[in-house]
Structures are given as C-alpha cells and as structure tokens.
Image (spheres, coloured by chain):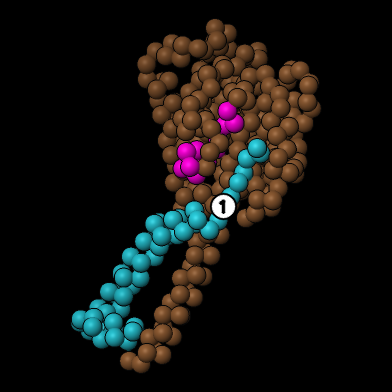
Amino acid sequence: MSVAGVLGELLITAGVLTLLYVGWQLWIGDMIFGAQRNAVGQDLSQQWEQEYAGPAPSASPSASPSAAPDAPAEPAPVEPVILPEAGDGETFAVMRIPRFGADYAWQVAGGVTRERTLDPIGIGHYPGTPMPGAVGNFAVAAHRTTWGAPFNRIAELHVGDAIVVETADGWYTYRFRTLEYVEPTEVDVLLPVPQVPDAPAGSRYITMTSCSPMYAMTERIVAYGVFESFTPRASGTPASLTEGVPA
Amino acid sequence: MYAALWRVLPGPWWVRVLIVIILVAAVLYGLFFYAFPWISEMVNPQEVTVE
C-alpha cells in the first residue's frame, strides 16, 4: 500500500463527496426536506379539520355570524376572520397553491428571519403587514432554492392561479396577478398598495418575495395576488382548491 | 486503502459486498441528513426578503 495509492484514493473520495454535495444541494436535499415540510403542513391542516369536526361548531369563536353551514350553493361573500399577528416563528397558516401540486402545503409563520422561520418552518410573514384577508398587503417570504424551496416554482404561476391561505378558521383565496423583479432594497413592494407610496389601503393583496436569480441573491422575485374570497371552515373546502389547474 | 478495507471484511465475497452496501448507505445517510445541511448553512447564503 503505497503513499501515492492512498493519496489517490483519498482524492477520488473527495471528488465523489463534492459531486454528492452538489447533487444534494440541487435536488436531493430539497426533495427530502420539502417532502417532510409538506407532510407537516398537511398534518396541521387535517388537525384543524378534526378539531373543527370534533367539538361543537362554536369552537371557532371568531367565526362570523353569517357563516351558515346550510347556505345555498352560491353563498354570499363572507367577511374574513382576521387573525391577530402571529409571534416570531409561530405557525398560523398553511399555504396551498394548486399550480405547485395537490400536496403542496407549506406552513406560514410569523417573522422573516432565516434561523427562526424561513429555514426551519418555510414561509414567513413580514411583521407589521396585515394578516390574511385584511385590507392592505399580506406580505410573505420564502426560499426559492434550498431548505425545501417553498417558492421554487414561483415564476411558473399563471394569471388567475389560486393562492390559498388556510387557517383554523377557513380558507383565504387570493388570485395570482403578476410577477416583478426588483432590487433587494425595494421595500415598497410591501406597502398596503404595492409600489404605490401614499396610496390609502383599500383592496386586499398578497405579496410573495423570494430570491432571484435562483441560487443567487442579487435580486428579488415578487409575486402579487388579489384577494378573492374567504371560505369559513363550516362551508368546506373552497372551489379554488378543487377546481383544478388550467393548463 | 479501500483494498485494505476489503481484506479486513469477514466472510465470503457476497457477505463483504452486503457489508459494503450497508456501510455506503450509512455514510450517505449521515451526509444527506447531517453533514450537508450543516455545510449548506455556511457556503450557500440565500436571502429572500426585501429590507
């Protein structure tokens, strides 16, 4: 066993390990972590459903009185339940985007720090921006690559695609409107009316930010959506989740 | 190095192959679930927020 022979084998091993790392970083790691996080999100969604079905329907104290379970097929628009702002790293919702697959179910938690929300949980809510369904701009951030990459396919959204935020109270359906690429300092995307300073808050928007280009951090990709409706849990899964995704 | 490992392993060739497969699987598991995530935090900064 010569020194050169051992050295050669060590170098080959180092090369193989490096290639393995690249493969893990680009594909395998996100598949593993993403599958785990989506499963956790689906469990949480099921838990909400069971908690609702288990005790009396009055278990949802903040449900609006107009949420009659025996409403006809075309229920009147329900005023959305507005949750209090979640604490840092506290999960309050599960985001569902049919365009990204029926099993897409990433948790949404308060705060946008990497160590407490974006890395371990998934999607982070910008502190100080409104909660889902509220007038103004519900702003969130998530990784586009690495850590399971919740917003990996953000650039594939089509106009009108459903972006559904599910909470214990029900489903907030937003519809994707447009994409924008901005500088990392462009905080105006978080305004009550995105990119329009001084405009009074009137409509309900969602803003999703992520990194651009992929595997880099020189720019940000921003997806905007507009609020469509709130579906209380009593009314069951909204059409936005069951209607399928147009090609 | 790897030849020496092969000679150290006990049993007929197919037992040795089995042991090697298990060893490789264990190493891959350790890399994918512990080593690589740890390295990734240091070499791959990803910022997704506007600030």
The image position of residue A151, as x and y in percent, is 61, 44
Residue B21 visible in the current orientation: yes
Q: Is residue A222 part of the magenta span, yes or no? A: no
Q: Quick check: A124 above or below B5?
A: above
Q: Which residue corresponds to the image point at 62% horizontal and 14% vertical from the top-left?
A: A78
Q: Residue furthest bottom?
A: A2
Relative depth, front residue between B39 and A47:
B39
The image position of residue A190, as x and y in percent, is 69, 30
Q: Quadrant of the N terminus of chain A?
A: bottom left
The image position of residue A9, as x and y in percent, is 41, 83
Residue A98 visible in the current orientation: no
Relative depth, front residue between A34 and A43:
A34
Q: Residue furthest left?
A: B11
The numbered mark 1 sits on a residue in which chain? Answer: B
Q: Is residue A182 found left or right of A90 in the rendered image?
A: right
Q: Amino acid at mark 1?
A: Pro
Q: Residues within 10 Å of mark 1 (few under 14, many from 20)?
A: few
Q: Colour of chain B?
A: cyan
The image position of residue A200, as x and y in percent, is 76, 17
What segment is highlighted magenta in the picture?
A: A115-127
Q: How many marks?
A: 1
Q: Residue furthest top?
A: A65
Figure quadrant of residue A164: top right
Relative depth, front residue between A218 and B12:
A218
Q: Colour of chain A?
A: brown
Q: Quick check: A5 above or below A137?
A: below
Q: Which residue is mark 1?
A: B45
Figure quadrant of residue A228: top right
